[in-house]
Amino acid sequence: MTLTVRQFACLADNYGFLVRDEASGAVACVDTPEADAVLQALKAAGWELDMILNTHWHPDHAGGNAAIKAATGASIVGPEEVTRIAPLDRAVTDGDIVILGESRFEVIGSGGHTLGHVAYFAPSDHVAFVGDTLFALGCGRIFEGTPAQMWQSLSRLAALPEDTSVYCAHEYTAANARFALSVDQSPALRSRADAIFAARVRGEPTVPTTIGLEKQTNPFLRAAGVDDFAALRAAKDVFKG
Ligand code: ZN
Ligand code: FE
């Protein structure tokens, strides 16, 4: 492994992430839900921030950009849509490469939640930061895109190596598990859901997950096709579990 990830809670149910390239000491934070929490995590780690990587423009993902840049001088990389709330140093889109020290991240277009949403995948370490596209046992709400776009985005993420560590941006897993159980009674899902409920009672995070685990048990990745996916997403939007 050449990357080290530190994960910390922000706001009500967001996660913030710091990622360090061990060969060079270069550090990035993925999204900026809360400037103070990010700066505190940097201090606790004894790391200096070089780069902010944004997944999408929502304030719970880019709202801390300006304050963190002012405090650290980090350069800000993200999809063009982030300029709605803060300036970018580099706009990235599907297929671009972001270099952090001696590590590289592939930018994967993952629109649907927002139109320009991107994910960042490090092939050296099989680590992916997926923002609000893929969640443990769930997926993001479709605010700006179409079900077809979101299905395409999820399919791209599902094609990553099965052992990829998937860093989702929210702790939504227990609620996602309740919805998943309403549409699927498989033993694999049941036992995963039980483990999730127990972990949450203990106050433990359920993120990161893996692509393999999600392919086995996430109802949105197990949908038969785009129509099935669209129906599931619509059902989840109104589910009261
Ligand atoms: Zn969002
Ligand atoms: Fe979010």
Image (tube, rainbow, N blue to C red):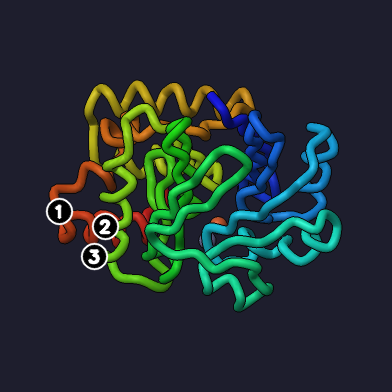
Q: Secondary structure at mark 3?
A: helix
The image quadrant in which ligand 2 is located:
bottom right
Whole-percent x, y for residue 146 in the image: 30, 70
- Above or below residue 14? Residue 123 is above
Mark 2 or mark 1, which has the lower sequence index? 2
Tag 2–tag 3 contact (CB < 8 Å): yes
Name the residue that disc number 2 marks.
151
- Above or below residue 51? Residue 62 is below
Query: Which labelled disc corresponds to residue 199?
Result: none
Circle 2 packing at 10 Å, graded few (<14), some (14-19), many (20+), is many
- Name the kind of residue labelled 2 in the image: Trp
- Above or below residue 195? Residue 218 is below
Q: Secondary structure at mark 1?
A: loop
Name the residue that disc number 3 marks.
148
Query: Which labelled disc corresponds to residue 225?
Result: 1
Mark 3 or mark 1, which has the lower sequence index? 3
Residue 62 placement, left or right of 80: right
Circle 1 packing at 10 Å, graded few (<14), some (14-19), many (20+), is few
Q: Could you tell me which residue is drawn at 26 percent across and 50 percent down?
A: 155
Quadrant of res 23: top right
Q: Could you tell me which residue is drawn at 47 percent across and 53 percent down?
A: 97
Tag 2–tag 1 contact (CB < 8 Å): yes
Q: Nearer the viewer, residue 222 or 153?
A: 153
